[in-house]
Image (spheres, rainbow, N blue to C red):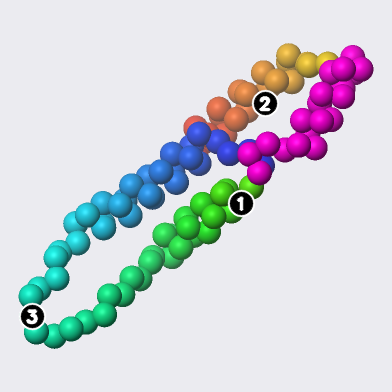
Amino acid sequence: MIISNTQVQNILKVYGEQTKVGKNAKPPSAGPVQRTDEVVLSAQAQEFSQILQALKNMPEVREDKVKELADRIATGNYHVDAKEIADKMLGRIVADRLR
């Protein structure tokens, strides 16, 4: 899975907006009526929460990929095509700008 800078910025923007909403909330009135607290999350906040939880559950290191690459490097079978890397980098930049 590729996570682009634009996607990260969008998630941070949503998180920032949700934080601002929480800070701007009015304090409860001192009336005699006792109410229970209730939190209602928007669909966007719920989606963000699910994405955040999925990211937390993902391993930080993909052990299978690390082992495969280490084996290929050790045996001399790992070759980097500079043109292919440059094409992918430029393609990602173009894709981010089109969004």
Q: Is the magenta stretch mostly helix, strand or loop?
A: helix
For label 2, the residue is 88
Give the answer, above or below, for where 89 lies relative to 95: above
Crowd tier of the residue under label 2, counting other residues whose Cα lies within 10 Å: few below 14, some 14–19, many 20 or above: few
Q: Distance between the Cα atoms at labels 3 and 1?
A: 44 Å
Count of marks overlaid on the render: 3
Above or below for 29 versus 18 = below
Q: What amino acid type is highlighted by mark number 3?
A: Gly
Task: Name the residue carrying label 1.
Answer: 57
Closer mark to the observer between disc 1 and disc 2: 1
Which residue shows up at 55% across the image and 27% down it?
93
* Amino acid type, mark 1: Asn
Question: Contact, CB < 8 Å: mark 2 with mark 3?
Answer: no
In this view of the protein, which residue sits in the foreground, 89 or 45?
45
For mark 3, does the 10 Å Cα neighbourhood hold few (<14), some (14 to 19), or many (20 or more) residues?
few
In the picture, measured across the screen, residue 83 lies left or right of residue 57, that is right
Residue 83 spot, x, y in % from top left:
73, 15
